[in-house]
Amino acid sequence: MTRSCFAERLERYLPLTDREAHALASLEDHQREVPRGTTIVRENDATDDIYVIRHGWVMSYVILDDGSRQILRLHFPGDMIGMSSTAFAEAPETLVTLSEATICPFDKSALRIIFEEHPRLAALFHIVAQAERVSLTDRLASLGRTSAKARVAALLVDVLVRLRFLNTQIIDTIPLKLTQEEIGDATGLTAVHVNRMMRALSEERLIARRDGHVRILDEAALAHTANYVNRYAELDLRWLPKPR
Amino acid sequence: MTRSCFAERLERYLPLTDREAHALASLEDHQREVPRGTTIVRENDATDDIYVIRHGWVMSYVILDDGSRQILRLHFPGDMIGMSSTAFAEAPETLVTLSEATICPFDKSALRIIFEEHPRLAALFHIVAQAERVSLTDRLASLGRTSAKARVAALLVDVLVRLRFLNTQIIDTIPLKLTQEEIGDATGLTAVHVNRMMRALSEERLIARRDGHVRILDEAALAHTANYVNRYAELDLRWLPKPR
DNA sequence: CGGGGGGTTGACTGATGTCAAAACAGGTGG
DNA sequence: CCACCTGTTTTGACATCAGTCAACCCCCCG
Protein backbone atom coordinates (compact mmCIF):
# COMPACT_ATOMS: atom_id res chain seq x y z
CA MET A 1 0.00 0.00 0.00
CA THR A 2 1.37 3.39 -1.00
CA ARG A 3 1.46 6.48 1.12
CA SER A 4 -1.61 8.68 1.21
CA CYS A 5 -1.41 12.05 -0.50
CA PHE A 6 -4.16 13.33 1.71
CA ALA A 7 -2.31 12.18 4.83
CA GLU A 8 0.73 14.06 3.64
CA ARG A 9 -1.37 17.18 3.40
CA LEU A 10 -2.66 16.70 6.93
CA GLU A 11 0.80 16.05 8.27
CA ARG A 12 1.74 19.56 7.26
CA TYR A 13 -0.38 20.53 10.23
CA LEU A 14 0.12 17.73 12.76
CA PRO A 15 1.62 14.24 13.00
CA LEU A 16 -0.76 11.31 12.46
CA THR A 17 -0.62 8.00 14.26
CA ASP A 18 0.22 4.87 12.29
CA ARG A 19 -3.35 3.67 12.60
CA GLU A 20 -4.62 6.95 11.21
CA ALA A 21 -2.13 7.03 8.37
CA HIS A 22 -3.05 3.47 7.55
CA ALA A 23 -6.75 4.24 7.47
CA LEU A 24 -6.18 7.12 5.09
CA ALA A 25 -3.86 5.07 2.91
CA SER A 26 -6.55 2.45 2.47
CA LEU A 27 -8.75 5.11 0.88
CA GLU A 28 -6.11 5.49 -1.81
CA ASP A 29 -5.67 1.80 -2.54
CA HIS A 30 -6.85 2.24 -6.05
CA GLN A 31 -5.44 4.68 -8.52
CA ARG A 32 -6.34 5.81 -12.01
CA GLU A 33 -4.34 7.75 -14.56
CA VAL A 34 -6.39 9.98 -16.82
CA PRO A 35 -5.49 12.39 -19.63
CA ARG A 36 -6.19 16.11 -19.69
CA GLY A 37 -9.81 17.00 -20.30
CA THR A 38 -11.25 13.89 -18.68
CA THR A 39 -14.64 14.30 -17.06
CA ILE A 40 -14.36 12.50 -13.74
CA VAL A 41 -17.92 13.25 -12.67
CA ARG A 42 -20.66 15.00 -14.58
CA GLU A 43 -23.16 17.33 -12.88
CA ASN A 44 -26.44 15.56 -12.05
CA ASP A 45 -25.00 12.09 -12.54
CA ALA A 46 -25.56 9.66 -9.72
CA THR A 47 -22.30 8.96 -7.95
CA ASP A 48 -21.00 7.63 -4.65
CA ASP A 49 -17.37 8.33 -5.32
CA ILE A 50 -14.87 10.60 -3.68
CA TYR A 51 -11.38 11.16 -5.05
CA VAL A 52 -7.99 12.13 -3.75
CA ILE A 53 -5.82 13.87 -6.31
CA ARG A 54 -2.39 12.35 -6.37
CA HIS A 55 -1.05 14.27 -9.33
CA GLY A 56 -2.32 16.93 -11.72
CA TRP A 57 -4.88 19.71 -11.72
CA VAL A 58 -8.67 19.36 -11.62
CA MET A 59 -11.44 21.95 -11.82
CA SER A 60 -15.02 21.81 -10.60
CA TYR A 61 -17.73 23.76 -12.37
CA VAL A 62 -21.45 24.12 -12.95
CA ILE A 63 -23.24 24.96 -16.19
CA LEU A 64 -26.19 27.35 -16.04
CA ASP A 65 -29.36 27.15 -18.09
CA ASP A 66 -28.08 29.63 -20.64
CA GLY A 67 -24.99 27.50 -21.21
CA SER A 68 -22.58 29.71 -19.32
CA ARG A 69 -20.13 28.08 -16.98
CA GLN A 70 -18.94 28.96 -13.48
CA ILE A 71 -15.72 27.35 -12.40
CA LEU A 72 -16.06 26.82 -8.66
CA ARG A 73 -12.59 25.85 -7.62
CA LEU A 74 -9.23 24.57 -8.78
CA HIS A 75 -8.03 21.40 -7.10
CA PHE A 76 -4.45 20.32 -6.65
CA PRO A 77 -2.60 17.20 -5.46
CA GLY A 78 -3.60 16.23 -1.94
CA ASP A 79 -7.06 17.73 -2.34
CA MET A 80 -10.06 15.51 -1.72
CA ILE A 81 -12.71 16.17 -4.36
CA GLY A 82 -16.24 15.01 -5.04
CA MET A 83 -17.02 15.34 -1.33
CA SER A 84 -20.48 16.62 -2.17
CA SER A 85 -21.44 13.02 -2.89
CA THR A 86 -21.45 12.53 0.88
CA ALA A 87 -24.52 14.77 1.02
CA PHE A 88 -26.19 14.27 -2.35
CA ALA A 89 -26.92 11.23 -4.44
CA GLU A 90 -26.45 13.25 -7.63
CA ALA A 91 -23.35 15.32 -8.23
CA PRO A 92 -24.01 19.05 -7.93
CA GLU A 93 -20.88 19.87 -9.93
CA THR A 94 -18.77 18.56 -12.77
CA LEU A 95 -15.13 17.54 -12.21
CA VAL A 96 -12.73 17.77 -15.14
CA THR A 97 -8.97 17.33 -15.28
CA LEU A 98 -6.96 20.34 -16.39
CA SER A 99 -3.84 18.24 -16.97
CA GLU A 100 -3.00 14.58 -17.13
CA ALA A 101 -3.74 13.43 -13.61
CA THR A 102 -3.61 10.57 -11.17
CA ILE A 103 -6.67 10.22 -8.98
CA CYS A 104 -7.61 7.73 -6.27
CA PRO A 105 -11.34 7.00 -6.25
CA PHE A 106 -13.08 5.45 -3.28
CA ASP A 107 -16.66 4.89 -2.28
CA LYS A 108 -18.13 7.27 0.26
CA SER A 109 -19.10 4.31 2.44
CA ALA A 110 -15.40 4.03 3.25
CA LEU A 111 -15.84 7.17 5.31
CA ARG A 112 -18.08 5.26 7.68
CA ILE A 113 -15.02 3.50 9.08
CA ILE A 114 -13.20 6.80 9.48
CA PHE A 115 -16.05 8.35 11.41
CA GLU A 116 -16.51 5.27 13.60
CA GLU A 117 -12.90 4.40 14.31
CA HIS A 118 -10.95 7.63 13.90
CA PRO A 119 -12.69 10.54 15.57
CA ARG A 120 -9.65 12.77 15.20
CA LEU A 121 -9.53 12.18 11.46
CA ALA A 122 -13.24 12.89 11.26
CA ALA A 123 -12.63 16.18 13.03
CA LEU A 124 -9.78 16.94 10.64
CA PHE A 125 -12.12 16.31 7.71
CA HIS A 126 -14.44 18.79 9.31
CA ILE A 127 -11.68 21.36 9.69
CA VAL A 128 -10.55 20.97 6.11
CA ALA A 129 -14.15 21.35 4.94
CA GLN A 130 -14.50 24.55 6.96
CA ALA A 131 -11.29 25.94 5.52
CA GLU A 132 -12.59 25.22 2.00
CA ARG A 133 -15.86 26.86 2.85
CA VAL A 134 -14.08 30.01 3.99
CA SER A 135 -12.00 29.97 0.84
CA LEU A 136 -15.27 29.88 -1.11
CA THR A 137 -16.57 32.88 0.80
CA ASP A 138 -13.39 34.73 -0.13
CA ARG A 139 -14.18 34.00 -3.77
CA LEU A 140 -17.74 35.13 -3.23
CA ALA A 141 -16.50 38.48 -1.97
CA SER A 142 -14.10 38.63 -4.88
CA LEU A 143 -16.86 38.11 -7.46
CA GLY A 144 -19.38 40.25 -5.67
CA ARG A 145 -17.33 43.23 -4.67
CA THR A 146 -14.06 43.56 -6.55
CA SER A 147 -13.01 44.78 -10.00
CA ALA A 148 -12.09 42.59 -12.93
CA LYS A 149 -8.41 43.23 -12.39
CA ALA A 150 -8.64 42.27 -8.73
CA ARG A 151 -10.40 39.02 -9.56
CA VAL A 152 -7.76 37.94 -12.02
CA ALA A 153 -5.05 38.91 -9.55
CA ALA A 154 -6.83 36.91 -6.84
CA LEU A 155 -6.87 33.81 -8.98
CA LEU A 156 -3.17 34.10 -9.71
CA VAL A 157 -2.17 34.68 -6.10
CA ASP A 158 -4.37 31.83 -4.90
CA VAL A 159 -2.78 29.41 -7.35
CA LEU A 160 0.71 30.60 -6.45
CA VAL A 161 0.17 30.26 -2.72
CA ARG A 162 -1.46 26.86 -2.97
CA LEU A 163 1.18 25.45 -5.30
CA ARG A 164 3.90 26.76 -3.07
CA PHE A 165 2.29 25.05 -0.10
CA LEU A 166 2.63 21.78 -2.01
CA ASN A 167 6.11 22.38 -3.30
CA THR A 168 8.36 24.89 -1.63
CA GLN A 169 10.50 24.88 -4.79
CA ILE A 170 7.95 27.10 -6.43
CA ILE A 171 9.06 30.62 -5.77
CA ASP A 172 7.32 32.92 -8.19
CA THR A 173 6.39 31.14 -11.41
CA ILE A 174 3.23 29.14 -12.03
CA PRO A 175 2.48 26.90 -14.98
CA LEU A 176 -0.99 28.22 -15.78
CA LYS A 177 -2.94 25.26 -17.08
CA LEU A 178 -5.98 27.40 -17.83
CA THR A 179 -7.04 29.13 -21.02
CA GLN A 180 -8.14 32.73 -20.72
CA GLU A 181 -11.65 31.49 -21.35
CA GLU A 182 -11.34 29.26 -18.28
CA ILE A 183 -9.90 32.08 -16.20
CA GLY A 184 -12.94 34.06 -17.27
CA ASP A 185 -15.29 31.28 -16.21
CA ALA A 186 -13.56 31.15 -12.84
CA THR A 187 -13.66 34.89 -12.26
CA GLY A 188 -17.02 35.71 -13.78
CA LEU A 189 -15.52 37.60 -16.73
CA THR A 190 -15.30 37.15 -20.48
CA ALA A 191 -12.18 35.75 -22.09
CA VAL A 192 -11.65 39.06 -23.89
CA HIS A 193 -11.71 41.03 -20.70
CA VAL A 194 -9.42 38.58 -18.95
CA ASN A 195 -6.95 39.22 -21.72
CA ARG A 196 -7.17 42.96 -21.14
CA MET A 197 -6.65 42.53 -17.40
CA MET A 198 -3.66 40.23 -17.86
CA ARG A 199 -2.13 42.82 -20.13
CA ALA A 200 -2.82 45.53 -17.58
CA LEU A 201 -1.14 43.47 -14.86
CA SER A 202 1.83 42.93 -17.17
CA GLU A 203 2.09 46.62 -17.98
CA GLU A 204 2.07 47.43 -14.29
CA ARG A 205 4.97 44.99 -13.90
CA LEU A 206 3.07 42.84 -11.42
CA ILE A 207 3.35 39.74 -13.60
CA ALA A 208 5.22 38.56 -16.69
CA ARG A 209 4.00 35.94 -19.13
CA ARG A 210 5.94 33.47 -21.26
CA ASP A 211 4.71 30.31 -23.00
CA GLY A 212 1.92 29.38 -20.68
CA HIS A 213 3.73 30.36 -17.50
CA VAL A 214 3.01 33.35 -15.32
CA ARG A 215 5.77 34.84 -13.27
CA ILE A 216 4.67 36.91 -10.32
CA LEU A 217 7.01 39.88 -10.20
CA ASP A 218 5.54 41.70 -7.23
CA GLU A 219 3.63 39.30 -5.07
CA ALA A 220 2.85 41.78 -2.31
CA ALA A 221 1.41 44.31 -4.75
CA LEU A 222 -0.56 41.61 -6.57
CA ALA A 223 -1.97 40.26 -3.32
CA HIS A 224 -2.91 43.79 -2.36
CA THR A 225 -4.78 44.57 -5.56
CA ALA A 226 -6.46 41.18 -5.17
CA ASN A 227 -7.59 41.77 -1.58
CA TYR A 228 -5.99 38.43 -0.87
CA VAL A 229 -6.02 36.70 2.52
CA ASN A 230 -3.96 33.57 3.03
CA ARG A 231 -6.21 31.12 4.86
CA TYR A 232 -3.97 28.10 4.69
CA ALA A 233 -1.23 29.37 6.93
CA GLU A 234 -2.70 28.74 10.33
CA LEU A 235 -5.32 26.24 11.41
CA ASP A 236 -6.46 25.95 14.99
CA LEU A 237 -6.24 22.30 16.01
CA ARG A 238 -6.33 22.63 19.76
CA TRP A 239 -9.83 21.26 20.21
CA LEU A 240 -9.18 17.98 18.39
CA PRO A 241 -10.01 14.68 20.07
CA LYS A 242 -7.22 12.34 21.09
CA PRO A 243 -5.93 10.15 18.27
CA ARG A 244 -6.63 6.41 18.28
CA MET B 1 -32.73 20.93 29.47
CA THR B 2 -34.68 22.23 26.49
CA ARG B 3 -34.93 20.58 23.13
CA SER B 4 -32.25 21.30 20.59
CA CYS B 5 -33.18 23.42 17.58
CA PHE B 6 -30.40 21.86 15.63
CA ALA B 7 -31.63 18.36 16.50
CA GLU B 8 -35.04 19.32 15.23
CA ARG B 9 -33.48 20.33 11.96
CA LEU B 10 -31.67 17.01 11.68
CA GLU B 11 -34.81 15.08 12.53
CA ARG B 12 -36.37 16.43 9.39
CA TYR B 13 -34.05 13.98 7.69
CA LEU B 14 -33.82 11.05 10.08
CA PRO B 15 -34.74 10.08 13.64
CA LEU B 16 -32.05 10.55 16.28
CA THR B 17 -31.45 8.29 19.24
CA ASP B 18 -32.08 9.66 22.73
CA ARG B 19 -28.36 9.72 23.40
CA GLU B 20 -27.77 11.72 20.25
CA ALA B 21 -30.59 14.14 20.96
CA HIS B 22 -29.27 14.58 24.45
CA ALA B 23 -25.76 15.30 23.24
CA LEU B 24 -27.06 17.96 20.90
CA ALA B 25 -29.31 19.45 23.55
CA SER B 26 -26.32 19.90 25.84
CA LEU B 27 -24.77 22.17 23.21
CA GLU B 28 -27.75 24.45 23.63
CA ASP B 29 -27.74 24.58 27.40
CA HIS B 30 -27.09 28.25 27.40
CA GLN B 31 -29.16 30.81 25.59
CA ARG B 32 -28.89 34.51 24.95
CA GLU B 33 -31.46 37.00 23.73
CA VAL B 34 -30.08 39.83 21.66
CA PRO B 35 -31.65 42.81 19.89
CA ARG B 36 -31.54 43.49 16.17
CA GLY B 37 -28.17 44.75 14.93
CA THR B 38 -26.10 42.94 17.55
CA THR B 39 -22.63 41.92 16.45
CA ILE B 40 -22.22 38.36 17.70
CA VAL B 41 -18.70 37.95 16.36
CA ARG B 42 -16.50 40.47 14.61
CA GLU B 43 -14.19 39.54 11.73
CA ASN B 44 -10.61 38.95 12.91
CA ASP B 45 -11.56 38.71 16.56
CA ALA B 46 -10.29 35.67 18.41
CA THR B 47 -13.17 33.36 19.22
CA ASP B 48 -13.81 29.73 20.13
CA ASP B 49 -17.57 29.97 19.99
CA ILE B 50 -20.16 28.31 17.83
CA TYR B 51 -23.84 29.23 17.95
CA VAL B 52 -27.13 27.60 17.22
CA ILE B 53 -29.84 30.03 16.20
CA ARG B 54 -32.99 29.36 18.13
CA HIS B 55 -34.96 32.33 16.92
CA GLY B 56 -34.42 35.24 14.54
CA TRP B 57 -32.31 36.03 11.49
CA VAL B 58 -28.54 36.45 11.35
CA MET B 59 -26.22 37.43 8.51
CA SER B 60 -22.54 36.74 7.99
CA TYR B 61 -20.39 39.14 6.04
CA VAL B 62 -16.87 40.34 5.31
CA ILE B 63 -15.64 43.89 4.80
CA LEU B 64 -13.08 44.53 2.07
CA ASP B 65 -10.20 46.97 2.20
CA ASP B 66 -12.15 49.65 0.35
CA GLY B 67 -14.92 49.42 2.93
CA SER B 68 -17.39 47.55 0.75
CA ARG B 69 -19.24 44.64 2.28
CA GLN B 70 -20.11 41.19 0.98
CA ILE B 71 -22.89 39.40 2.80
CA LEU B 72 -22.01 35.73 2.66
CA ARG B 73 -25.15 34.05 3.87
CA LEU B 74 -28.39 34.51 5.73
CA HIS B 75 -28.89 32.23 8.70
CA PHE B 76 -32.19 31.08 10.14
CA PRO B 77 -33.38 29.20 13.22
CA GLY B 78 -31.80 25.76 13.47
CA ASP B 79 -28.68 26.90 11.63
CA MET B 80 -25.34 26.41 13.33
CA ILE B 81 -23.17 29.46 12.77
CA GLY B 82 -19.62 30.50 13.55
CA MET B 83 -18.44 27.02 12.55
CA SER B 84 -15.35 28.53 11.00
CA SER B 85 -13.97 28.87 14.51
CA THR B 86 -13.38 25.11 14.37
CA ALA B 87 -10.70 25.76 11.77
CA PHE B 88 -9.41 29.23 12.60
CA ALA B 89 -8.52 30.93 15.83
CA GLU B 90 -9.69 34.28 14.42
CA ALA B 91 -13.10 34.71 12.90
CA PRO B 92 -12.98 35.07 9.11
CA GLU B 93 -16.42 36.68 9.04
CA THR B 94 -18.66 38.94 11.06
CA LEU B 95 -22.00 37.71 12.42
CA VAL B 96 -24.76 40.26 12.99
CA THR B 97 -28.40 39.77 13.90
CA LEU B 98 -30.98 41.00 11.40
CA SER B 99 -33.79 40.80 13.94
CA GLU B 100 -34.09 40.30 17.66
CA ALA B 101 -32.74 36.81 18.09
CA THR B 102 -32.14 33.97 20.51
CA ILE B 103 -28.83 32.23 20.11
CA CYS B 104 -27.18 29.37 21.97
CA PRO B 105 -23.41 29.80 22.21
CA PHE B 106 -21.10 26.91 23.03
CA ASP B 107 -17.37 26.38 22.96
CA LYS B 108 -15.95 24.47 20.03
CA SER B 109 -14.30 22.06 22.44
CA ALA B 110 -17.79 20.66 23.04
CA LEU B 111 -17.56 19.17 19.59
CA ARG B 112 -14.78 16.90 20.79
CA ILE B 113 -17.33 14.82 22.68
CA ILE B 114 -19.56 14.64 19.61
CA PHE B 115 -16.74 13.40 17.42
CA GLU B 116 -15.57 10.88 20.02
CA GLU B 117 -18.89 9.53 21.21
CA HIS B 118 -21.32 10.11 18.36
CA PRO B 119 -19.85 9.15 15.02
CA ARG B 120 -23.19 9.39 13.27
CA LEU B 121 -23.71 12.94 14.49
CA ALA B 122 -20.20 13.78 13.36
CA ALA B 123 -21.06 12.43 9.93
CA LEU B 124 -24.26 14.48 9.94
CA PHE B 125 -22.24 17.60 10.74
CA HIS B 126 -20.13 16.72 7.77
CA ILE B 127 -23.17 16.32 5.53
CA VAL B 128 -24.68 19.59 6.64
CA ALA B 129 -21.36 21.32 6.01
CA GLN B 130 -21.23 19.86 2.51
CA ALA B 131 -24.76 21.02 1.78
CA GLU B 132 -23.82 24.52 2.91
CA ARG B 133 -20.76 24.42 0.74
CA VAL B 134 -22.82 23.51 -2.30
CA SER B 135 -25.24 26.27 -1.47
CA LEU B 136 -22.28 28.66 -1.48
CA THR B 137 -21.19 27.42 -4.89
CA ASP B 138 -24.71 28.15 -6.15
CA ARG B 139 -24.29 31.71 -4.94
CA LEU B 140 -20.89 31.87 -6.58
CA ALA B 141 -22.45 30.93 -9.91
CA SER B 142 -25.19 33.45 -9.27
CA LEU B 143 -22.74 36.31 -8.69
CA GLY B 144 -20.34 35.23 -11.40
CA ARG B 145 -22.66 34.39 -14.20
CA THR B 146 -26.15 35.81 -13.80
CA SER B 147 -27.81 39.21 -14.30
CA ALA B 148 -28.76 41.60 -11.56
CA LYS B 149 -32.40 40.62 -11.81
CA ALA B 150 -31.57 36.94 -11.52
CA ARG B 151 -29.45 37.55 -8.42
CA VAL B 152 -32.20 39.40 -6.61
CA ALA B 153 -34.69 36.72 -7.64
CA ALA B 154 -32.31 34.04 -6.37
CA LEU B 155 -32.08 35.69 -2.97
CA LEU B 156 -35.85 35.89 -2.67
CA VAL B 157 -36.45 32.29 -3.70
CA ASP B 158 -33.72 31.04 -1.40
CA VAL B 159 -35.25 32.83 1.57
CA LEU B 160 -38.73 31.61 0.71
CA VAL B 161 -37.67 27.99 0.34
CA ARG B 162 -35.61 27.99 3.50
CA LEU B 163 -38.29 29.67 5.60
CA ARG B 164 -40.87 27.26 4.29
CA PHE B 165 -38.64 24.37 5.27
CA LEU B 166 -38.74 25.71 8.83
CA ASN B 167 -42.40 26.53 8.90
CA THR B 168 -44.77 24.94 6.47
CA GLN B 169 -47.27 27.69 7.27
CA ILE B 170 -45.30 29.98 5.03
CA ILE B 171 -46.83 29.71 1.62
CA ASP B 172 -45.76 32.65 -0.45
CA THR B 173 -45.00 35.69 1.69
CA ILE B 174 -41.69 36.48 3.34
CA PRO B 175 -40.99 39.16 5.92
CA LEU B 176 -37.89 40.63 4.34
CA LYS B 177 -35.73 41.76 7.21
CA LEU B 178 -33.14 43.29 4.87
CA THR B 179 -32.76 46.82 3.58
CA GLN B 180 -32.18 47.21 -0.13
CA GLU B 181 -28.63 48.16 0.75
CA GLU B 182 -28.23 44.79 2.45
CA ILE B 183 -29.79 42.95 -0.48
CA GLY B 184 -27.23 44.73 -2.62
CA ASP B 185 -24.39 43.65 -0.37
CA ALA B 186 -25.63 40.08 -0.58
CA THR B 187 -26.01 40.07 -4.35
CA GLY B 188 -23.03 42.19 -5.31
CA LEU B 189 -25.15 45.13 -6.47
CA THR B 190 -25.78 48.70 -5.37
CA ALA B 191 -28.85 49.61 -3.38
CA VAL B 192 -30.09 51.75 -6.25
CA HIS B 193 -29.91 48.92 -8.72
CA VAL B 194 -31.56 46.50 -6.30
CA ASN B 195 -34.44 48.95 -6.18
CA ARG B 196 -34.71 48.95 -9.95
CA MET B 197 -34.67 45.16 -10.08
CA MET B 198 -37.32 44.83 -7.38
CA ARG B 199 -39.47 47.20 -9.37
CA ALA B 200 -38.88 45.18 -12.52
CA LEU B 201 -39.87 41.98 -10.74
CA SER B 202 -42.99 43.72 -9.46
CA GLU B 203 -43.90 45.00 -12.90
CA GLU B 204 -43.52 41.50 -14.30
CA ARG B 205 -45.96 40.35 -11.62
CA LEU B 206 -43.44 37.90 -10.17
CA ILE B 207 -43.56 39.53 -6.75
CA ALA B 208 -45.60 42.09 -4.86
CA ARG B 209 -44.35 44.27 -2.04
CA ARG B 210 -46.18 45.69 0.95
CA ASP B 211 -44.78 47.13 4.18
CA GLY B 212 -41.58 45.16 4.35
CA HIS B 213 -43.06 41.92 3.11
CA VAL B 214 -42.52 40.34 -0.26
CA ARG B 215 -45.18 38.11 -1.70
CA ILE B 216 -44.01 35.71 -4.36
CA LEU B 217 -46.74 35.66 -7.00
CA ASP B 218 -45.18 33.23 -9.44
CA GLU B 219 -42.67 31.06 -7.68
CA ALA B 220 -41.91 28.85 -10.66
CA ALA B 221 -41.16 31.82 -12.90
CA LEU B 222 -39.10 33.51 -10.20
CA ALA B 223 -37.10 30.34 -9.59
CA HIS B 224 -36.57 30.07 -13.32
CA THR B 225 -35.27 33.59 -13.78
CA ALA B 226 -33.07 32.96 -10.75
CA ASN B 227 -31.59 29.72 -12.05
CA TYR B 228 -32.57 28.29 -8.70
CA VAL B 229 -31.88 24.73 -7.58
CA ASN B 230 -33.36 23.48 -4.32
CA ARG B 231 -30.57 21.64 -2.55
CA TYR B 232 -32.31 21.03 0.74
CA ALA B 233 -34.94 18.62 -0.52
CA GLU B 234 -32.98 15.43 -0.66
CA LEU B 235 -29.91 14.41 1.29
CA ASP B 236 -28.29 11.03 0.84
CA LEU B 237 -27.84 9.47 4.27
CA ARG B 238 -27.33 5.84 3.33
CA TRP B 239 -23.65 5.75 4.14
CA LEU B 240 -24.02 6.94 7.73
CA PRO B 241 -22.50 4.93 10.57
CA LYS B 242 -24.76 3.20 13.05
CA PRO B 243 -26.05 5.46 15.82
CA ARG B 244 -24.83 5.02 19.37
C1' DC C 1 -41.19 70.15 14.27
C1' DG C 2 -36.91 68.40 12.86
C1' DG C 3 -33.76 64.71 11.72
C1' DG C 4 -32.34 60.35 10.05
C1' DG C 5 -32.81 56.26 7.62
C1' DG C 6 -34.61 53.95 3.95
C1' DG C 7 -36.95 53.86 -0.60
C1' DT C 8 -37.65 55.78 -5.36
C1' DT C 9 -36.50 58.01 -9.52
C1' DG C 10 -33.90 60.37 -13.32
C1' DA C 11 -29.72 61.74 -15.80
C1' DC C 12 -25.36 60.55 -16.70
C1' DT C 13 -20.92 57.65 -16.45
C1' DG C 14 -18.03 53.90 -16.80
C1' DA C 15 -16.65 49.12 -16.50
C1' DT C 16 -17.32 45.13 -18.74
C1' DG C 17 -19.55 42.53 -22.51
C1' DT C 18 -20.12 41.74 -27.55
C1' DC C 19 -18.66 41.20 -32.08
C1' DA C 20 -15.32 40.67 -35.42
C1' DA C 21 -10.91 40.16 -37.40
C1' DA C 22 -6.22 39.06 -37.34
C1' DA C 23 -2.13 36.99 -35.32
C1' DC C 24 -0.27 32.99 -33.31
C1' DA C 25 0.65 28.17 -31.72
C1' DG C 26 0.61 23.36 -31.78
C1' DG C 27 -0.70 19.04 -33.90
C1' DT C 28 -1.71 16.12 -37.98
C1' DG C 29 -1.46 14.18 -42.33
C1' DG C 30 0.40 14.34 -46.82
C1' DC D 1 9.16 19.79 -44.55
C1' DC D 2 5.06 21.92 -45.64
C1' DA D 3 0.12 22.95 -45.60
C1' DC D 4 -3.59 22.91 -43.12
C1' DC D 5 -6.69 22.93 -39.17
C1' DT D 6 -8.24 24.03 -34.87
C1' DG D 7 -8.10 26.39 -30.70
C1' DT D 8 -6.21 30.29 -28.29
C1' DT D 9 -4.62 35.00 -27.76
C1' DT D 10 -4.74 39.73 -28.98
C1' DT D 11 -6.73 44.00 -30.48
C1' DG D 12 -10.17 47.50 -31.89
C1' DA D 13 -14.85 49.44 -32.24
C1' DC D 14 -19.01 49.60 -30.26
C1' DA D 15 -23.03 48.35 -27.03
C1' DT D 16 -25.04 47.71 -22.61
C1' DC D 17 -25.70 46.71 -17.91
C1' DA D 18 -24.95 48.32 -13.62
C1' DG D 19 -22.79 52.16 -10.89
C1' DT D 20 -22.74 57.07 -9.48
C1' DC D 21 -24.68 61.22 -8.12
C1' DA D 22 -28.32 63.87 -6.74
C1' DA D 23 -32.86 64.99 -5.57
C1' DC D 24 -37.04 64.02 -3.41
C1' DC D 25 -40.29 61.17 -0.93
C1' DC D 26 -42.02 58.84 2.95
C1' DC D 27 -42.19 57.28 7.48
C1' DC D 28 -40.96 56.84 12.05
C1' DC D 29 -39.43 58.73 16.19
C1' DG D 30 -37.62 61.88 19.43
Image (tube, coloured by chain):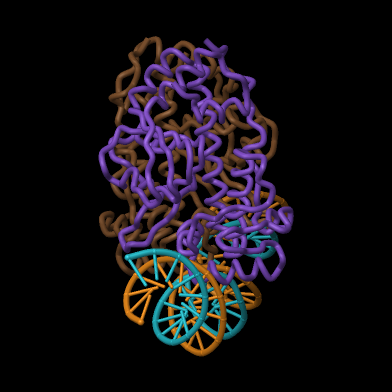
Chain colours: A brown, B purple, C orange, D cyan
Nearer to the camera, B206 or A2: B206
Q: Is residue A24 above or below residue A95?
A: above
Is A6 on the left-hand or right-hand side of B144?
Answer: left
Q: Residue at x 72, y 66 (%)?
A: B205
User: Would residue A114 be seen by someone viewing this image from the given angle?
Assistant: no
Q: Residue at x 41, y 31 (%)?
A: A128
Nearer to the camera, A53 or A101: A53
Q: Is residue B18 above or below residue B168?
A: above
Counting from the top left corner in percent of width and height, residue A201 is at 36, 65
Counting from the top left corner in percent of width and height, residue A135 is at 41, 44
Q: Residue at x 35, y 13 (%)?
A: A243
Nearer to the camera, A94 or B99: B99
Counting from the top left corner in percent of width and height, residue B235 is at 63, 30
Is A231 on the left-hand or right-hand side of A34?
Answer: left
- Where residue A129 sits, quadrant-wise, is top left
- The C terminus of chain A: image quadrant: top left
